[in-house]
Amino acid sequence: MKVLQFREAIAEAMSEEMRRDESVYLLGEEVAEYNGAYKASKGMLDEFGAKRVIDTPIAELGFSGIAVGSAMNGNRPIVEYMTFNFSLVGIDQIINNAAKIRQMSGGQFNCPIVFRGPTGSAGQLAATHSQAFENWYANTPGLKVVVPSTPYDAKGLLKAAIRDDDPVIFMESEQMYGDKGEVPEGEYILPIGVADVKKEGTDVTVVSFGKIIKEAFKAADILDREGISVEIIDLRTVRPMDFDTIFNSVKKTNRLVILEEAWPFASVSSEITYQVQENVFDYLDAPIQRITTADTPAPFSPVLLKEWLPNADDVVKAVKKVLYKQ
């Protein structure tokens, strides 16, 4: 095993796939000359040249549409957004073309494309640059939505996404690009749609994904010292979602807390809550608790931002609530 930063795992996945398949290429703002806004494509321009690592204008609608047309004609583009907040400029191409073209063409066209970049809050970036859109894109039939939390998962899932014949939304975090983790020396691919039990436990199940899952691990350390055993499930993929792993864990622990960095209304945690009560209600010994951001636009003030985001203390309180220990 070797140790890579999250950004290095992303770059390695893209480079390996570009060496393997000449139809794979990368485009987006600052991906080439600047080595990526977050250095997630460092060295790729030197290796693959300007025809396969392409700097674009600040025009997300335009380069998203070019990439969709390219995918329909046999290529496998990777579109990098500097942030998924900017994907809203190109969302018509993602939802009305990439996601629907297979059905609308009666199977004559598919769209093997990856849209990737950071999601959620990244500190003091204020209301228009701190939004999480996992539930937006997961609401769209035809799209797969992947949100890894470790370098290992990021590399294996990105390689799977690039090889997938359907469009994949691949969401990262500006605050995770420097995270380090072990990654195998040889090639490996992780299947899309399979969750990972990151920590075994017996008293309560905590489900999360993306960078906010770090708060679940902090909370689990606190609770372990109090004799409370927490099982942590990392979804890794929001759509398709691995409900069976969640159900099996709830059958064991009989309690569920869901942690998500997004607004509460119509969220990913809302769907998980519905599916659990529909399928394994009889195993629940307490009402499901979910933890989200506050239901307001993200603030700029660091004091307010700390209150807006979920944290480990919130998880500890929710776990004790489902265990009736408050």
Image (cartoon, rainbow, N blue to C red):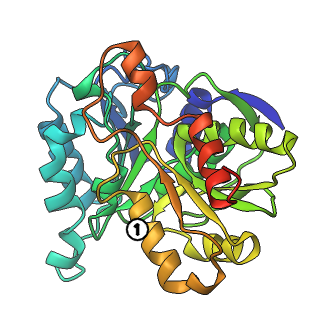
* 265 left or right, relative to 258: left
User: Vertical placement of 249 versus 196: above or below?
Assistant: below
Residue visible at 20% across and 43% down?
64
Residue visible at 40% across and 14% down?
302
Can you give x and y, in whole percent of width and height, for residue 263 in the image? 33, 46
Residue visible at 55% across and 73% down?
243
Q: Secondary structure at mark 1?
A: helix
Can you give x and y, in whole percent of width and height, for residue 150 in the image? 64, 40
User: Which one is in front, 279 or 313?
Assistant: 313
User: Vertical placement of 78 versus 325: above or below?
Assistant: above
* 295 left or right, relative to 58: right
Whether residue 183 is visible to the viewer of this picture, yes or no, is: no
User: Which one is in front, 268 or 178?
Assistant: 268
Q: Residues within 10 Å of mark 1 (few under 14, many from 20)?
A: few
Can you give x and y, in whole percent of width and height, for residue 275 in the image? 47, 77
* 136 left or right, relative to 179: left
Tell me which corner region of the image, top left, top right, bottom left or bottom right, holds residue 15.
top right
The amino acid sitting under disc 1 is Glu
